[in-house]
Amino acid sequence: MPPKAKLRKLAIVPAYNEAGMVGRVVREIHRQAPDFDVLVVDDGSTDATSAEATAEGAAVIRHPYNLGIGGAVQSGYKHALRGDYHVAVQIDGDGQHKPEYLSKLLKKLQTSGDEADMVCGSRFRGKPGYKVPLGRRLGNLIFSIVLTAITRRRITDPTSGFRMTNRRGIELFARDYPHDYPEVEALLMLHAHRLRIHEVHAPMNARGFGRSSIDYPRSAYYMAKVLLALFVGLFRRRPTAIEATGKPETGIDPPAAE
């Protein structure tokens, strides 16, 4: 593909019963980043999530039942792979992530260079933008210490779902993606495949609608489960480059940004 070819970019918005917010999220993405196509993955919602997303001009994939955040995000990556997108970004459907920071993430991500394969928006490289509950801050700190030690790269916000990846990341996640509480485990996957992870500061909003699936009674269980998954993941066999993508690592790179 010619080096000056236009990058195809996709915003993946996983949503479960987010009818009260998803339309505003789609509108804000269109306003702040009009060069991104928007795909809402309705993960088995029982409300009008799909209708609200469609009304704002988003493409919609609708799951017949709830798969969880991992399954919803992987559906988005599968769509990105089939659609020959070069860049994909995850943006939660609850209004927490700010589309105004998409340009900052994209600038850091160089799809044919040596800079990064994934860029994560971090609340903790500066002011987070809202008061993060103490339990979440503690859990995030523990995961941060563990992942920083494993990857030997400073990771300040491993639970952030605001993350952008290039074609290499799309190919990996379309074929293999953790399905339970995937944000932390996905970073370990990237490291195992020798993909490069960077962070930029991206303040976030408090959740705009509904409730998080991780409340205080579940916090300790969540931390223990994810830590166990991390250590199990260290010994998990990963597909080779040919198994994962169908081509050797020396395959043609996607085009550079204009």
Image (tube, rainbow, N blue to C red):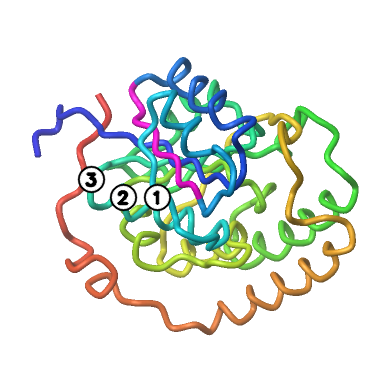
Give the mark nearest the N terminus, 1 or 3.
Answer: 1
Cβ atoms at labels 1 and 3 below 8 Å apart: no
Q: Residue at x 45, y 33 (%)?
A: 108
Q: Residue at x 64, y 51 (%)?
A: 154
In the image, residue 190 lies at what x, y percent?
A: 46, 61
Q: Secondary structure at mark 3?
A: loop
Q: Secondary structure at mark 2?
A: helix
Q: Which residues are magenta?
A: 35-42
Q: Identify which residue, 193 or 210, lies in the foreground.
A: 210
Report which quarter residue 211 is drawn in: top right
Residue 218 part of the magenta-drawn span: no
How many neighbours does mark 1 have within 10 angstroms: few (below 14), some (14-19), or many (20 or more)? many
Q: Residue at x 21, y 43 (%)?
A: 254
Check disc 1 and report the residue beneath it.
76
In the image, residue 61 lies at what x, y percent?
A: 39, 47
When the figure is inspected, residue 100 is found, relative to residue 202, above or below; the finding is above
Cβ atoms at labels 2 and 3 below 8 Å apart: yes
Q: Identify which residue, 83 or 231, lies in the foreground.
A: 83
Amino acid residing under circle 2: His
**In 3D space, how far apart are the residues under numbered discs 2 and 3 (Cα atoms)?**
6 Å
Amino acid residing under circle 1: Gly
- 256 left or right of 231 in image: left
- 143 left or right of 249 in image: right
Report which quarter residue 187 is drawn in: bottom right
Report which quarter residue 204 is drawn in: top right
Check disc 3 and report the residue beneath it.
83
Cβ atoms at labels 2 and 1 below 8 Å apart: yes
